[in-house]
Each structure stands twice: as C-alpha cells, then as structure tokens.
Image (cartoon, helix red, strand yellow):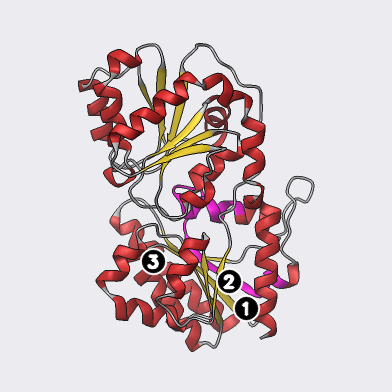
C-alpha cells in the first residue's frame, strides 16, 4: 500500500521496492532492535515494503504460528510474485540465525539473490559453536550487511561471500521539544532488554552501593522488557525507589518524552552489534555512557560520550560521577551530539540500500 506522502517521505525507488522481499520479525509495535529498524524502514525508507514476518514475541504457540505462517507466505511469494528478485533477510544469532538459514536455502532454490543483514551482537560466540555450519550459510549469500566496520572485517574473515558491506542502523527523525527539568538531578535513560547480558544489573549495583552519595543527584529511567520481576524486586529490596523508575515497555509519546527530557543514555552491555537505542538517544542529543563492545566504539567518540570495559563497575561509577559534575555542559551539547549521527538518518541509509540493490539487480 502506498504511504501518505504528505506525512512520510520515502527514498527507495518504487521499481526497486517491487523487486525486494524482506524477511524479518514482527515489528508492530516494535519491540527490540531489529523490530525498530524494520518499523523505520516501513515508515520512512521504502515506498512499498514487502515483508514476510517469520517470528513474533509472546507465548511459544504464538511464536510457532508466526514461524509456520511466515514460511507458508514466503513460499507463496516465491511461486507467485515474479517481481521479487532479491530476498533481504534480517537476522541475529542462535535460533534467529537458524530460522533465517531456511529462508536462505529456499531463496537460493528459487534462484533469488540473497542479502543476509546481521544484527546479532553475540555472533562471535555463536559462530564459535558451529563454525562450519554457520559459514556454509554465509557462503550461500550474495551479500552480507553488517552494522559497523569492525563487524565487516570480522565477517570477511569467516566467509567467502562476495560482498560484505556496512549499512548503518536507521533511526526515525527525532521529534524534539523543549526539555522540562523539574529538579537538578542527572536523568539517565536505559532502553533495552532487561537482562544480565545488557549490564543493567551492574548499573543497579552501582546505584544501590552508593545510594547515600547519589541522594538527590541522579535518577535512572528504565524502559524495556525481560527480567522485569527481578528488576522491580531489586528496586524495592535495595530501597531504590527514589533512584530508579521502571517505566515499563515504552513507545510512542512516552518514549519521545524520555528521549527529550533525559540527559544521558546508558548501556553497560556485554555484547552488542550497533545498538539502535544508543543511536536513537543520540539523535535526540543525549550524551552516552556505554561499554566498548561491538560497533559502539565506532559510534561513540569522546566528543559525545564515554566508554568503559563491560563489567567494570568501578569505571562505570566514575563516568556517572563525571556526568553529574558536568550536566550543564552535557545539556548545552545536545545539538552537537545530534549532528554526530546524521549518517543513521533514513535518507542516508536509503541511499546506501538503493546503491546496493541496484548493484545486485544488474549483476
């Protein structure tokens, strides 16, 4: 269906859209990094977004239904839609990759060009568990899309795929409004899966250990799903109600409010690709405190944030302390930080996708 052009500007040529079938997870509403990327693609990048949804969230039976129906729909498109010439598959690691591998094999069977767009931050550990099987799937693809230069170099070392390229994650244009500071506290924002691997409980440990020192100085807003019961239990038992606000799953106007009003985005993760939450926060001008994993060091320079080793809670505390002392300076630099992530805009990403699709269609 053609989008309302008064509301949404699209950049991928209509003739090229007709030739692309995207395969990816359920993304309405967007929950998770890949879902957020697909949602932005649909709203801002493609004029006509042909997509096969191959996975969903929720209960096990719901996930199975998405998988079964998705593959059935995919086969129908392969048999009936003669315009489709490229299958663009978005994947992560582990189950997501093996599910995507089925689509890679069948797309090749139907003589389609295959793009595998890899988002998984823990891909190196996953690859080490099944090197030959994973490489066999990667080698079947016509193109691998990675999220950063460091990931590009890594995949070039493990596959014979002819084209390995970087296309950055995309974020929707920021919806800016004037910050509302009702107190003098530093407002920190964590958006993402609530799990130990994301380092969120390291952050809770710091706030609990030094809560007397941080009284009246800092508050952490957390938005996401996952181990929410453990998080809420830690907040209550640690007496952190004045320091941590669990916002639930945030989207829409609530998410825009947090992105506008919080001062820094914090992500002490142990593994990442190129986290969409950081890019989105920076598009609103938020300063960053994050771990130096995956593609994050390519995203966050000393001008826009600070990095630490994952699990180093001493350094994490030191960076929070510096941010507290310099929060006025951080707030004045929001425009500078916003300009730092221009290459993640829909028009920039669409330009790269256009060029890649044209290359594959003319090969």
Residue 39, position as x, y percentages in the image: 56, 52
- Residue labelled with disc 3: 67
**Residue visible at 74% across and 72% down?**
15
The relative height of residue 105 versus residue 7 in the rendered view (above or below) is below
**Closer to the camera, 188 or 55?**
188
Q: Is residue 202 left or right of residue 177?
A: left
- Residue labelled with disc 2: 21
Give, as a single range, the part of the protein colored magenta.
16-40
Give the residue at the far left of this rendering.
237
Q: Could you tell me if the residues under marks 1 and 2 are in contact, i.e. CB atoms within 8 Å? A: yes
Residue 226, position as x, y percentages in the image: 32, 42
- Residue labelled with disc 1: 84
SS for dot 3: helix
**Closer to the camera, 291 or 102?**
291
Cα separation between marks 1 and 2: 6 Å
Q: Is residue 94 left or right of residue 332?
A: left
């Amino acid at each position: 269906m053609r989008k309302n052009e008064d509301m949404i500007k699209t950049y991928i040529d209509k003739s090229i859209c007709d030739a692309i079938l995207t395969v990816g997870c359920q993304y309405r509403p967007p929950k998770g990094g890949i879902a957020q990327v697909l949602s932005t693609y649909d709203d801002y990048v493609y004029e006509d977004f042909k997509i096969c949804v191959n996975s969903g969230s929720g209960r096990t039976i719901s996930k199975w239904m998405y998988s079964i129906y998705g593959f059935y729909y995919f086969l129908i498109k392969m048999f009936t839609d003669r315009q489709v010439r490229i299958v663009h598959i978005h994947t992560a690691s582990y189950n997501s990759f093996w599910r995507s591998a089925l689509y890679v094999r069948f797309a090749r069977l139907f003589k389609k060009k295959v793009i595998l767009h890899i988002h998984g931050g823990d891909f190196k550990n996953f690859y080490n568990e099944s090197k030959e099987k994973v490489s066999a799937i990667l080698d079947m693809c016509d193109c691998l899309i990675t999220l950063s230069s460091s990931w590009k170099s890594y995949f070039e070392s493990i596959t014979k795929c002819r084209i390995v390229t970087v296309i950055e994650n995309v974020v929707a244009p920021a919806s800016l409004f004037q910050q509302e500071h009702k107190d003098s506290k530093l407002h920190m924002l964590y958006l993402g899966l609530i799990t130990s691997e994301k380092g969120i409980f390291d952050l809770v440990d710091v706030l609990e250990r030094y809560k007397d020192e941080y009284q009246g100085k800092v508050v952490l807003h957390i938005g996401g799903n996952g181990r929410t019961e453990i998080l809420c239990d830690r907040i209550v038992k640690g007496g952190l109600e004045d320091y941590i606000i669990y916002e639930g799953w945030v989207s829409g106007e609530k998410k825009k409010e947090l992105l506008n009003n919080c001062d820094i985005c914090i992500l002490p993760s142990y593994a990442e690709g190129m986290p969409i939450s950081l890019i989105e926060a920076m598009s609103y001008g938020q300063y960053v405190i994050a771990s130096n994993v995956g593609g994050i060091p390519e995203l966050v320079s000393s001008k826009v944030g600070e990095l630490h080793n994952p699990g180093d809670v001493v350094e994490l505390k030191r960076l929070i302390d510096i941010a507290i002392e310099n929060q006025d300076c951080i707030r004045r630099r929001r425009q500078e930080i916003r300009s730092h992530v221009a290459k993640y805009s829909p028009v920039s990403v669409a330009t790269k996708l256009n060029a890649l699709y044209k290359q594959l269609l003319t090969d």
